[in-house]
Amino acid sequence: MALAGPDGRRVDPLSVGESRGSHDRRRGAVPRSLEQYLRMRRTSIGVSPSLGMVERASRFEICARAYHQSAIQRLETLTCEIIALCNDIASLEKEEAQGDTYNAVLILYRFNGLTRDQTLDHVIAMVGDRAEEFHALRLQTPRLCEALELPPPERIAVSRWIDGARTWTAATSTGSARHPATARPSRSSAQRPP
């Protein structure tokens, strides 16, 4: 059963996404596109419910009026995708060695005609693009709060929510940038998947 805040936000989409990903892995199913994969990962990575738990643990809650704005929804999507892509970069060699193709790098590699290293560079660039978009949206949120006429406590909650998401994405992307998979060429860079 889904936990929900007073505004009706679900706190546990993780169970649906994780179940779907596990089922697909067991069947050997590979997503047909990166977008299909990212759609599943946005729920299975557990970021949205974790951001909800950050609110609860930190004793604040972003109001529904702000949370449901497209800019805030996009910030949440970007947070999920940055963390999922960084996770895939960090786990690439392990998943590849295990024959697990449920990884953004390997999915793109299968379909895009690039070498594995070019594909890895492309996914790293995707993280950078999403981080830049996150930063630009973050800078727009004071105007959003003003347009919504949010009182100061609600503006502070929006700012704290965004700071939590920003801190998490920064820590995740910094860790992935230092990961060996992004720092050295792979032995399989010239090979193509079956």
Image (cartoon, rainbow, N blue to C red):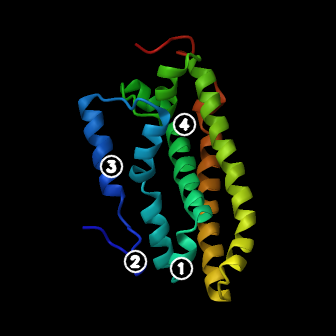
Q: Residue at x 49, y 21 (%)?
A: 111
In the picture as drawn, the residue positioned furthest to the front comes out as 147
Write down the residue under mark 3: 18
Q: CA distance from mark 4 to mark 2?
A: 33 Å
As drawn, the label of residue 53 is none
Going from N to C along the chain, the mark reached first, 3 or 1, is 3
Going from N to C along the chain, the mark reached first, 2 or 3, is 2
What x and y, as percent, mark residue 86? 56, 43
Q: Amino acid at mark 3?
A: Glu
- The quarter of the picture where the N terminus appears is bottom left
Q: Does residue 75 appear left or right of residue 47 in this picture?
A: right
Q: Nearer the viewer, mark 3 or mark 4?
A: 3
Secondary structure at badge 1 equals: loop
Give neighbour class at mark 3: few <14, some 14-19, many 20+ (Cα, 10 Å).
some
- The quarter of the picture where the C terminus appears is top left
Is residue 75 or residue 170 the one in the foreground? Answer: 75
Secondary structure at badge 4 equals: helix
Give neighbour class at mark 2: few <14, some 14-19, many 20+ (Cα, 10 Å).
few
In terms of image quadrants, where is residue 98?
top left
Going from N to C along the chain, the mark reached first, 2 or 1, is 2
What x and y, as percent, mark residue 126? 63, 38
Q: Residue at x 30, y 34 (%)?
A: 25
Write down the residue under mark 2: 5
Q: CA distance from mark 2 to mark 1?
A: 10 Å
Instruction: Tell me, yes or no, whether the two marked residues, 1 and 4, touch with CB atoms within 8 Å.
Output: no
In the depicted structure, whether residue 162 falls above or below residue 193: below
Write down the residue under mark 4: 89
Q: Amino acid at mark 2?
A: Gly
Q: CA distance from mark 3 to mark 1?
A: 27 Å
